[in-house]
Amino acid sequence: MKNKEIKSALDYYDVKLPDEDKIESTVLNVINSQRTVKTPELSFKRIIISQISSVKNSFWFFSFLFLIVIVFMYLKIDSEYTTLFLFSTTPFLNIIALPTLFFTFNRERMELEGTCLIKPATVFSAKSVICGALDLILILFAVLISAIVTDVPVLQSAFLGFLGYTSSAFIAMCFSLFFKTQVAMAVTSAIYAVAVSSVFVFEDVANFILNMNFATLSIIFLLFFLLLSGVVYYTKNNYKYERVVFLYGTENI
Amino acid sequence: MRDRELVQQAKYGDKEALSQIVRRYYNEIYLFIYRRLGDSYSAEDITQEVFLKFTQCLPQYKEKDKLKSYLLSIAINCSNDYYRKAKREVLSEEIEITEEAENSFDSDMRECIKSALLQLPDEQRNVIILRYYHDLKIREISRITSCSQSTVKSRLYRGENQLKEILKGVL
C-alpha cells in the first residue's frame, strides 16, 4: 500500500523528457550496434532430440497407459471386432499426443530460437515426427501381438492401423490450420468417435472394412498418406511465426 | 504489436522491431535513470547504454520475463556501474544539488523532492522510484532488484520513513 503523503509529495517531481531527436539518435545507435551474429544452425536430427526432452511427462504416461490397454485387450479378448476396435482407437493417441506436444512447446521453442536459427515450422515438424513415430511404433507392436494371439492377417491389420493414424492426423492438422489447437483436437476426436461408432452400429460397415482386400486398403492408405504429407509440407512452408504460435494453442492472436 | 512479438522479430534481426522497442520504452527508462541520478545528461547516456546492452543480450533474453522489468533491471545495473565508475563526481554533484535545493526549499517543491530522493541510499531509492513512479508491485520489484520480497518491503518502509524525515516540513 502506497503512502498517500509521500505519493502526493513525489508527484511534484516531474521530469522533462528528452527531445524526439535524442530518442531518434538512440534508436539509430541501437540499430547500428545490432550485430548480425551467425548463430549455430541445428540439424533436424538434433532438433528432434531436443524436442523429445521437452515433451511433458503426461504425454509419456498416456502413451504407456495406452500401450498397456492395447496389450491387455489383445490378450483377453479374441474377435475380429475387437481387433477392429483396437486399431480404430490407436489413432486416438495421435489426438492426445498432438495437443500435449504443442501445449508444452512454446517456452522451449522460444529458448531454442533465442540461441539457434530454427524456424518454428521446423520445430513443428520435429514434434510431428516424434508424435507420428511413437504412434506407428504402437501400431506395429499391436499388429505383432495380434499376429501371435489371433489369426488376423498381419499386413491388413497394419494397414488398417496406419490408415487410422494418417486419416486422424490429416483431419487434426487440417482443423489446426483454421482453429485453435483445442478446438481442432476436440472436433477431430468427435469425428473419429462417430466414425468408430458407425463401425460398431452398422455391421455392414464393419464387414466391409474387415473384408476389404489389400489393394483397396493400401490405395485408401496411400491417399490419406499423400494428403497428410501435403498438409505437413504446406504447414512447414507457409506458416508464419504468428500462425504457428496460434497453432500451438498457447496464445490468442 | 505486443512486446513478445517485437522481441521475437528483433531476435531475427528486424531493425524496425528493435526501434519500436526503443521508442516504446525510452521514456520509462529515462525517467527511472533520471530520478535515480538527478542528472539529465548522464540519464540520456545511460538510457542509450541500457538499450545497447539489451541489444547485446537479446539472444539470451527469455520471454517469460516482462520486457519492461527486464529493461529496468538493466537500467539498475547500468546506473550501478555509472556510480562505481564515477563515484567521486556523483557524490559531489549530489551534495551540490542538495544544497541548491535546500536554498530554494519553499519556492521549488520539485527540487526539494529531487534532493530528498538523492539523499536516500541507492537500494531504498530504487525501490521508492519503482514503487511510486513506475507503479510496480513488490513481487516485480523483487525480481528487478534480485532480492527477496521481504527485503523490498523493508527497504520501502525504511525509504518512506527516511523520506518523511527529510521532508518533515513539507509533508
Image (cartoon, rainbow, N blue to C red):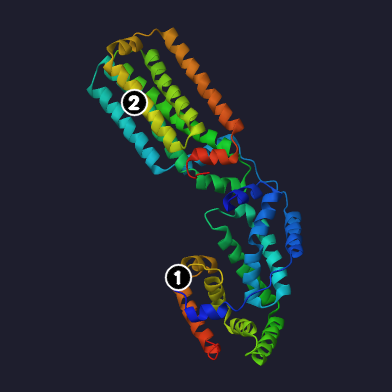
Left or right for B47, reference B152: right
Of all chains, the one bearing label 1 is B
* 3D distance between C-alphas at marks 1 and 2: 51 Å
**Given this view, does label 1 or label 2 mark the residue nearer the observer?**
2
Kindly state the secondary structure of the residue where label 1 is placed. helix
Q: For residue A152, what is the image quadrant?
A: top left
- Kind of element beneath mark 2: helix
In this view, A73 is above or below B71: above
Q: Quadrant of residue A96?
A: top left
Kind of residue at badge 1: Gln
Instruction: Give how far across and how far down residue B34 sits, in percent.
Output: 66, 73
Q: Report x, y in % for residue B14.
A: 69, 47
Whether residue A177 is situated above or below residue A209 in the rendered picture: below
Pointer 2: what residue?
Answer: A193
Q: In the image shown, does A207 or B146 lie closer to the viewer?
A: A207
User: Which of A3 and B131 lies nearest the eye of the viewer?
Assistant: A3
Whether residue A87 is visible? no
Q: Is residue B92 above or below residue B51?
A: below
Same subunit: marks 1 and 2: no
Which disc number belongs to residue B149?
Answer: 1
Q: In the rendering, at what x and y percent does residue B128 appear? A: 54, 76
User: Around disc 2, counting alpha carbons within 10 Å, would you say few (fewer than 14), some (14 to 19), or many (20 or more)?
Assistant: some
Instruction: Give the residue type at disc 2.
Output: Ala
Q: Based on the displayed image, in which of its 4 quarters is residue A72 positioned?
A: top left
Check if mark 1's residue and mark 2's residue have beta carbons within 8 Å. no
What's the residue at 54%, 58% (across, down)?
A: B66
At 55% across and 68% down in the image, what residue appears? B134
Residue A167 in percent (x, y) is at 44, 22
| Chain name for mark 2 | A
